[in-house]
Amino acid sequence: MVAKAPDFGGMRLPPLTQTQAISVSADTTKEPGPFRSVFGYCFSYWRQQPVLIPAMALAMLVATVCDAVIPVFAGELIDALTDRSALTQAIRAVEMIAGIGVAYVLSRLVVFALLNRSSTTIMRRMVEDAFFRVQRFSTDWHASSFAGATVRKVTRGMWAYDNMADTVILGFFPALVVLVSATLLVALRWSLMGGVIAVGVAFYLVLSSTLVLRYVAPAGRLANEMDSKLGAALADSISCNQVVKAFAGEDREDRRLSDLTQIWRRLTYRTWMRGLNSSGVQNLTVISLQAVVLSLAVWLWSEGRATPGDVAYLLTTYSVMQGYLREIATHVRNMQRGVNDMEDIARFSRMKLGVEDRPGAHAVTVPHGRIDFVDVTFRYGGQSRAVYEDFSLTIQAGERIGLVGRSGSGKSTFVKLLQRLYDLEAGQILVDGNDIAEITQASLRENISVVPQEPILFHRSLAENIGYGRPGAKPEEIVAAAKRVFAHDFIVTLPQGYATEVGERGVKLSGGERQRVALARAVLADAPILIMDEATSSLDSLSEVLMQRAVEAVIEGRTTIIIAHRLSTVRQVDRILVFEAGEIVEQGSHDELIARPGGHYRSLFDAQAFGLVGDVEAAQ
């Protein structure tokens, strides 16, 4: 199905597929006041440098004043050269011009040295702060956000700050000082000339700001959004390259990217052309103002109110001002581009974390592992139906529990709530009597080991992936954990053994190998509570038998929750909980539940045992 191409400012763009149209149009609503939000974000970092920033501004002020004062002595030099008896005055003017020039160069060197130190420090903090917050955003946020786009927003925002700082410190600040000081100096000699220049400069500033903010900026924002989506599309296709190859999708992905790059090119081209048009209008305004100033200077000379040196002073002063005026247009464009590029990273700093530690939250240790759900009510955001409503359950310390049920019955939600990946609507979850909402998330999760059904590994070495379960673990402890889950034998056959890097998300390993590495990681963590989401689903029959033995040894003496899709994995647990629509409809041992004809568990078991087609979900 082909969807109508999105309308970006009236441009006719190539048609997109329905999926692409949704992707491009999603998340385009921006908060009002981007300048205020971005500069507030920057000021939060500038306040952290109470000495460096003022010192940099002072050095820039000295350099700028030097630039503004040089025309005064240039005028004196011209007047001195018209009178051969004023050699001393001419030499003094040359000395002052040279001295001011040296002061200007030295001051600028100080500014750049301080700016380099300030910007690199702030850019580092920006990335670290953004990473800190993104890591702690909600599970739902990560599920609905492209990792590639998020990375692009953070890095683009970091580099945009460099451009922003240069624009403010090296661009706007000196331009403002020069324009104000030069205008005042001229006005002190000729009030009419000063008034004309002041009006002309004010008109130019208003015109430049209006063109950039009202004409160029909207197009730039759309181009920026498309840039993020292009990065997300690249990351999505590259990270799913195995699927692309499996279904011969290279040409389809090429076409998909081509559609997006065509939109990106047109939006970027339009932005650049608007910038070019804006620049042309601004340059014509500067030339017009120059003609007015020169005409007025000639008139003052003809009236005997200005000497040749005065005219030279005016020409030199306006030449300096003209240079700054021309650059202001560039500074405004750079600032707008910087605001666009930093808007996302600034928004990250204001977004609420998904689940936050409450004030006064304390760290705990969990010596036993008893779990209590007390009158729990929970619904996912935006859903009207509650997953759990007044749900209560007690799991004794050391008890081995199996969770079974059809897809959507509440099994996965149960373990997500136990890890406090979401906050409850009502009720409490207690671990060894501690309300998990009142303790730190870090201490809670340090006491829970999780082996997911689809284990995710870092693009790091096997030793680092296994050792992630216990920071600071010794090499022999890592090896021992791998041996317990029968991962050691395949690891030592690899060219670099435990130093072998596994590829992005563990792509270099088979599914069963990834699962064993994830289990070894959980074994090494040695937490009192263990959650296993069908941890043997990717193993062959022989490996599964060996793994079951390892699991039995691993779960001994600890509270264990096993989400079972294959019911054979929960035969030996102490209690099986059968979920249906957020409720426990049956519970008991395997033998007890299988003996109930027509029961929920018996129906699930029969569907798997005999391959009944009518209950496909039971096999999921």
Image (spheres, grey):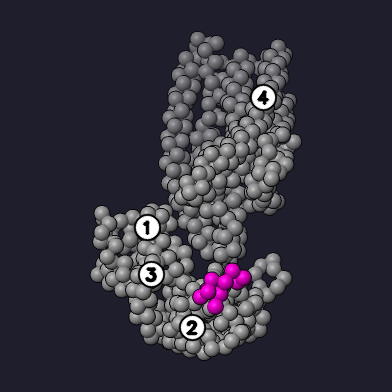
Real-space CA distance between mark 4 and mark 2, rounded to the nearest whole angstrom: 73 Å
Q: Helix or strand or loop: what does disc 3 sit on?
A: helix
Q: Which residue is mark 4?
A: 280
Quarter of the image for the C terminus: give it: bottom right
Depth check, front residue: 339 or 375: 375
State the extent of the magenta-drawn residues as a range: 606-615
Q: Helix or strand or loop: what does disc 4 sit on?
A: helix
Give the residue type at disc 2.
Answer: Ile
Point out the tag, 4 or 2, that comes first from the N-terminus.
4
Point out the tag, 3 or 4, that comes first from the N-terminus.
4
Which numbered disc, 3 or 4, marks the residue closer to the eye?
3
Quarter of the image for the N terminus: give it: top right
Is 119 placed above or below 255 here? below
Give the percent coordinates (x, y) of residue 467: 34, 66
Give the residue type at disc 1.
Answer: Leu
Question: Does the segment drawn in magenta span residue 251?
Answer: no
Q: Which residue is mark 2?
A: 401
